[in-house]
Image (spheres, helix red, strand yellow):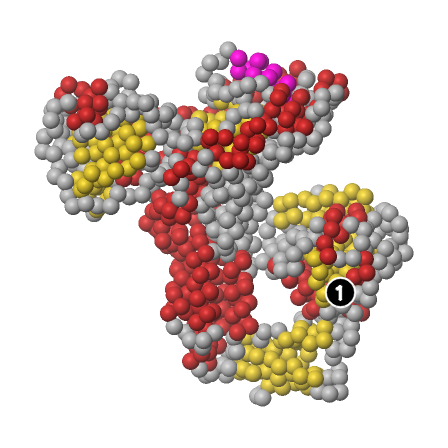
């Protein structure tokens, strides 16, 4: 892998007067080779024709002021390129001038290349000709960056490394470029941080901000000193950062409970900073993000309570006091960095304006753009924020962070950032990575490209180069994996390559053809299936594979399912029913296996594709026709070729209606209940394999429907809820919350309110409705008068049955796992009359499954009909998320609310 640490080699430092002599046996220029793409993209890179091999003997000319880190890095690069130790004294086939000196200036002059003088800080010049190479920075960091560019332009050809003849002149757009470890979730290890710093150095990032939200000593327990082991680890990271020309910024977030004017709290902050100072940290930050808007002590109320923005005044005071008490008199300390409480947008609230007015000059202020996760940030946005905050801004770019959706990886490039933010007061950019450190590399590398050369940044080109740098020998497999995990809030286009192939496939299939588009899609699915193994074998980054393991597993099984899908439909088109049956069995098995993985991979693409394949498949079909007397005739068609069929089973929802043991496979069902029936046929082969038909929906009689109130009508979890309600026997009407009225409850058997509905759009519309209501939106618990205190708890996968005898418990006991991975559980604290079946683990007073019978006293008023609150999250009954136990508890709740509506349930 390009970022792994290379072994150093001792190369002779040749005294300047000797090295200025003409090199001996200069390597001859070879045929032209393409100049590799470099990340970050240089301001100017000019090929000068041809390339020459790096010889085994190299002389390096450096002076006493040469940057030591650059010298070490150069040694590693030359060793990796095949160079050996230079003999004592004398010329060499290749002479390298390292740093901006008189000798390097002379060498550049002979090559007719301008030196680095006049470039901005960190700028550099690289010039290569047969026998001569100059790496000269305007400062030591610039020279270090020149070596990183050298590493990337070297091209390996068998045992030989070729160096193109070229000129590079380069400098950064933004002064601060880096990573802010600022996500919620499991802490990175020291090894994770060291790898990040090595990657930062290789891509010319210069900042690493430590602000791990789940580090208790950073946030909740900020007053407490770090344990010695943690101090050693942070010191190790800070030292490594310094050795790689990366500024390490240590942040403390005291805002949850700090008394801004209390000397004791100031002393706690300075003591913590002093402990880090002793470990080599020289840059500090005080953060006030993600807290409430009030003050926490009487002293603050007295001192700042009359200010138009008391919290802003208190925070500005604490920042000033920390600078005075700790940073003053320490010239090697960097500028103080802060995050305001209102860190997004630039509307100019009273808080934001007072914060900008009161915070002392010289403090760098973080800002996340127009939103917390900003799809776009343009110059006008930045200019407005700069006018409000009145300080140089650092853009805290919440990309590729995934703590708000930990089931996803965001492996696309940074997009939506104006090339001119630096002109509007943005001093730098730090990207907030994912919980998974190594998979964050693709996003971080493209962010490095943007922050270094915003004007030359081309997201797609940058991403493809990043795939090569990060993927190493498995770059193509990484491209397949990254494509399936590319969509994000910045660029919502899901899996663009896979989507394009699927679209072409369906266009071809609708013409009754399985041709080039089918083969292209099958090939891509095959690449998905083998990508995990190829990344393990060829990427050279075990940490990446380990951290991405669940997503790689899902990719593999989606690849197998997709490959089988294309083969199944192609076989049906050509009349090969035996192959179609067997590929269908493979598809069903692979799909079921993929859905056991909690993480999400191309969810907007793969699930609709597989659903459409199921609808298009004719391996097993079902017809359901009225018999004229209130019954249904169920007829199954089976295409299994040489695979013998033992019998066919017929189902309504989960309930077995009957079976047929020989063809034609037909069942007369004389007395179906008046309900919505979701009918399927399941053909079972003699070898035990089975294939189920696509569902056929029939409504018998005129049952009252359920009303499903949602945010958007096509959310995956809500679709799963609708299907489950139908499987329980209820016709379902779906309506967006904003479009509902109280009258929509009339004539309904049940009102179900999803958490995708915004509580404000629901309000009290159904509070007095005399029909059962079931909801898992915690703020609707409040609107309906069901609970006084309401909320949601993240990273929970279970509920605790607090009353096994409750009808709502459905026979479950103890702690019940309801999610296949950590998700959010909604809860409320209901009135004493409520039926409480389950609670939050560790805090069972917070009910996660509770209800009221008609006439029960609620927190507000009495229940006009049954009211039930559930634990579910926004994923509803998404089968990738919820367990069978969760579905069972949902079924129990529905059947308790509407006993007559559960005619097709198995319970």
Instruction: Work out whether 490 lies above or below 67.
Output: below
**Closer to the camera in the image, 176 or 260:** 176
Residue 64 image-quadrant placement = top left
Q: Is residue 269 shown left or right of residue 542?
A: right
Q: Which residue is mark 1?
A: 706
Q: Residues within 10 Å of mark 1 (few under 14, many from 20)?
A: many
Instruction: Work out whether 851 lies above or below 113.
Output: below
Q: Quadrant of the N terminus?
A: top left
Q: Residue at x 22, y 23 (%)?
A: 105
Q: Is residue 32 shown left or right of residue 551?
A: left
**Closer to the camera in the image, 683 or 765:** 765
Q: Quadrant of the C terminus?
A: bottom right
Residue 477 image-quadrant placement = bottom left
Kindly give the residue lying farthest to the left in the view shown: 25
Asked if residue 561 can be seen in this view, the reply is: yes
Asked if residue 568 can be seen in this view, the reply is: no
Instruction: Work out whether 650 lies above or below 90.
Output: below
Q: Which residues are magenta?
A: 315-328
Q: Residue at x 27, y 39 (%)?
A: 153
The x, y position of residue 75, in whole percent, is: 26, 30
Q: Residue at x 72, y 66 (%)?
A: 732
Kindly give the residue lying farthest to the top in the view shown: 329
**Closer to the camera in the image, 116 or 202:** 116
Instruction: Name the magenta segment's main secondary structure.
Output: helix
Q: Is residue 273 shown left or right of residue 146?
A: right
- Does residue 733 belong to the magenta stretch? no
The x, y position of residue 460, in whole percent, is: 40, 48
What secondary structure is found at the residue carrying circle 1?
Answer: strand
Q: Residue at x 66, y 17 (%)?
A: 264
């Amino acid at each position: 892998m390009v970022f792994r640490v290379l072994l150093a080699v001792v190369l002779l430092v040749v005294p300047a007067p000797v090295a200025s002599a003409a090199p001996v046996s200069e390597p001859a220029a070879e045929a032209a080779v393409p100049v590799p793409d470099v990340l970050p993209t240089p301001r100017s890179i000019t090929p000068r024709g041809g390339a020459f091999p790096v010889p085994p003997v190299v002389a390096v000319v450096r002076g006493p002021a040469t940057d030591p880190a650059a010298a070490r890095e150069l040694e590693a690069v030359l060793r990796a390129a095949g160079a050996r130790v230079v003999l004592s004294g004398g010329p060499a086939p290749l002479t390298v001038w390292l740093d901006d000196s008189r000798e390097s200036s002379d060498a550049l002059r002979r090559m007719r290349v301008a030196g680095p003088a006049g470039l901005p800080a960190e700028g550099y010049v690289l010039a290569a000709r047969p026998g001569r190479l100059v790496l000269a920075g305007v400062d030591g960091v610039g020279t270090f960056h020149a070596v990183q560019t050298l590493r990337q332009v070297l091209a390996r050809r068998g045992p030989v490394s070729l160096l193109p003849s070229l000129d590079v002149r380069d400098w950064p757009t933004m002064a601060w470029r880096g990573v802010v470890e600022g996500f919620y979730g499991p802490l990175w290890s020291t090894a994770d941080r060291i790898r990040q710093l090595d990657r930062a150095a290789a891509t010319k990032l210069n900042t690493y901000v430590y602000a791990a939200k789940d580090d208790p000593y950073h946030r909740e327990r900020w007053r407490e000193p770090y344990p010695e082991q943690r101090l050693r680890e942070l010191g190790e990271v800070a030292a490594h950062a310094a050795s790689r020309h990366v500024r390490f910024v240590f942040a403390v977030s005291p805002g949850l409970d700090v008394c801004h004017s209390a000397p004791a709290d100031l002393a706690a902050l300075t003591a913590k900073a002093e402990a880090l100072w002793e470990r080599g940290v020289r840059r500090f930050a005080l953060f006030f993000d993600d807290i409430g808007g009030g003050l926490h002590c009487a002293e603050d109320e007295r001192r700042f309570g009359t200010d138009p923005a008391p919290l802003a005044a208190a925070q500005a005071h604490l920042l000033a006091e920390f600078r005075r008490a700790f940073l003053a008199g320490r010239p090697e300390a960097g500028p103080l960095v802060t995050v305001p409480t209102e860190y997004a947008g630039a509307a100019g609230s009273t808080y934001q304006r007072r914060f900008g007015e009161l915070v002392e000059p010289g403090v760098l202020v973080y800002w996340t753009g127009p939103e917390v996760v900003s799809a776009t940030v343009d110059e006008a946005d930045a200019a407005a924020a700069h006018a409000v905050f009145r300080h140089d801004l650092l853009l805290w770019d919440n990309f590729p962070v995934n703590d708000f959706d930990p089931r996803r990886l965001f492996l696309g490039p940074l997009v939506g950032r104006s090339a001119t933010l630096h002109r509007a007061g943005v001093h730098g950019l730090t990207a907030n990575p994912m919980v998974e450190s190594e998979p964050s590399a693709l996003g971080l590398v493209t962010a490095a490209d943007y922050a270094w050369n915003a004007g030359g940044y081309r997201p797609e080109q940058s991403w493809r180069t990043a795939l090569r740098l990060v993927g190493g020998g498995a770059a193509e497999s990484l491209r397949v994996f990254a494509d399936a995990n590319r969509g994000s809030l910045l660029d919502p286009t899901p899996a663009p390559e896979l989507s394009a192939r699927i679209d072409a496939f369906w266009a071809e299939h609708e013409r009754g053809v399985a041709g080039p588009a089918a083969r292209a899609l099958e090939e891509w699915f095959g690449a998905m299936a083998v990508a995990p193994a190829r990344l393990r074998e060829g990427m050279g980054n075990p940490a990446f594979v380990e951290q991405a393991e669940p997503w790689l597993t899902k990719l593999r099984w989606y690849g197998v399912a997709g490959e089988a899908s294309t083969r199944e439909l192609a076989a049906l088109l050509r009349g090969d029913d035996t192959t179609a049956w067997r590929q269908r069995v493979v598809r069903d098995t692979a799909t079921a296996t993929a859905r056991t993985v909690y993480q999400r991979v191309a969810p907007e693409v793969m699930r609709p594709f597989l659903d459409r394949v199921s609808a298009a498949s004719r391996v097993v079909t079902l017809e359901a026709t009225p018999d004229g007397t209130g019954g249904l005739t169920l007829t199954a068609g089976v295409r299994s070729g040489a695979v013998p069929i033992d019998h066919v089973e017929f189902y309504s929802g989960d309930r077995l209606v009957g079976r047929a043991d020989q063809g034609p496979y037909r069942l007369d069902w004389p007395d179906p209940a008046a309900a919505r029936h979701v009918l399927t046929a399941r053909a079972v082969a003699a070898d035990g394999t089975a294939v189920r038909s696509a569902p056929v929906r029939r409504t018998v009689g005129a049952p009252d429907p359920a009303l499903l109130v949602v945010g958007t009508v096509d959310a995956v979890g809500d679709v799963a809820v609708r299907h489950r309600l139908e499987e329980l026997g209820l016709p379902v009407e779906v309506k967006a919350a904003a479009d509902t009225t109280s009258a929509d409850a009339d004539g309904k058997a049940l009102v179900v309110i999803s958490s995708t509905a915004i509580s404000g759009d629901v309000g009290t519309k159904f509070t007095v409705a005399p029909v059962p209501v079931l909801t898992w939106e915690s703020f609707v618990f409040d609107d309906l008068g069901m609970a006084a205190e309401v909320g949601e708890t993240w990273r929970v996968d279970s509920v605790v049955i607090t009353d096994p005898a409750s009808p709502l418990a459905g026979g479950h006991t103890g702690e019940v796992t309801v999610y296949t991975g950590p998700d959010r559980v909604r809860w409320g604290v209901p009135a004493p009359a409520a039926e409480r079946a389950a609670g939050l683990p560790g805090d069972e007073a917070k009910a996660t499954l509770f209800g009221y019978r008609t006439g029960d006293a609620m927190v507000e008023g009495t229940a006009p009909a049954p009211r039930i609150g559930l634990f579910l999250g926004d994923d509803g009954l998404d089968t990738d998320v919820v367990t069978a136990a969760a579905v069972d508890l949902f079924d129990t709740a529905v059947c308790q609310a509407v006993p007559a509506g559960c005619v097709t349930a198995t319970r």
